[in-house]
Amino acid sequence: MSPTPQLRRAGAADAAELTRLRLVMLASADVHPDPGWTPQCEAYFRERLGTDPHFVAYVIAAGDLLLSSAVGQCMRSLPRPGRAPYVGHIASVATDPAHRRRGYARLTFRAVHDHLVAAGCSRIDLTASPEGEALYRSIGYADPTGPTPLTWKADR
């Protein structure tokens, strides 16, 4: 008999499974990293989840198998009138394809969102996939207001 799925905060020991779910999320965006990337991602999760109080992941776990996950971080930002000095970012929301349509993504996402709010984040950013957009909007996420956000990246 399979263990009952449980929502819990992830720890450093979950690094390999979090990386597997991150690969699921990336594949849904047609991103396929080189094989050498996987150990790098695992090491990142292991280090950050073991030492960084501003980095958090919540998972739906059935024993050692992770069925769904969401990852977030809280970052200090410049002071601005009427806004707390922390901004959150949620990334890598993923559910194993065999376990979708059970509300797991909503549970993990909401846990990370609530964690970041409790940590003092007055704004939380994310990049929505077409599949996830309705979920995020149902929780209150909306198009940004104010100045147009722009991004610069180095050509590779």
Image: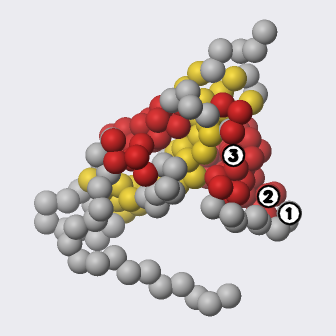
Quadrant in which the N terminus is drawn: top right
**Res. 107 in view:** yes
Which residue, as the protein is rendered here, is positioned at the far left?
Answer: 81
- Estimate the spatial distance between the alpha carbons at disc 2 and disc 3, rounded to whole Å: 11 Å
User: For the residue carrying disc 3, how many other residues have a C-alpha within 10 Å: few (<14), some (14-19), or many (20+)?
Assistant: many
Quadrant in which the C terminus is drawn: bottom right
Chain-order first, disc 2 or disc 3: 3
Q: Amino acid at mark 2?
A: Thr
Say which residue appears at 72% left-offset and 53% top-offset: 23
Which residue, as the protein is rendered here, is positioned at the far right?
Answer: 35
- Estimate the spatial distance between the alpha carbons at disc 3 and disc 1, rounded to whole Å: 15 Å
**How many circles with numbers are drawn on the protein?**
3
Say which residue appears at 32% left-offset and 51% top-offset: 141
Closest to the observer, 85 or 65: 65
Q: Amino acid at mark 3?
A: Leu
Q: Whole-percent x and y of residue 88?
A: 39, 55
Q: Which residue is mark 3?
A: 21
Q: Whole-percent x and y of residue 76?
A: 36, 62
**Disc 1 and disc 2 in contact, CB within 8 angstroms:** yes
Residue 35 disc label: 1
Say which residue appears at 13% left-offset and 60% top-offset: 82
As drawn, is 25 to the left or to the right of 58?
right
Q: Which residue is mark 2?
A: 38
**Disc 3 and disc 1 in contact, CB within 8 angstroms:** no
- Estimate the spatial distance between the alpha carbons at disc 1 and disc 2, rounded to whole Å: 6 Å
Closest to the observer, 77 or 124: 124
Q: Amino acid at mark 1?
A: Pro
Q: Secondary structure at mark 3?
A: helix
User: For the residue carrying disc 1, how many other residues have a C-alpha within 10 Å: few (<14), some (14-19), or many (20+)?
Assistant: few
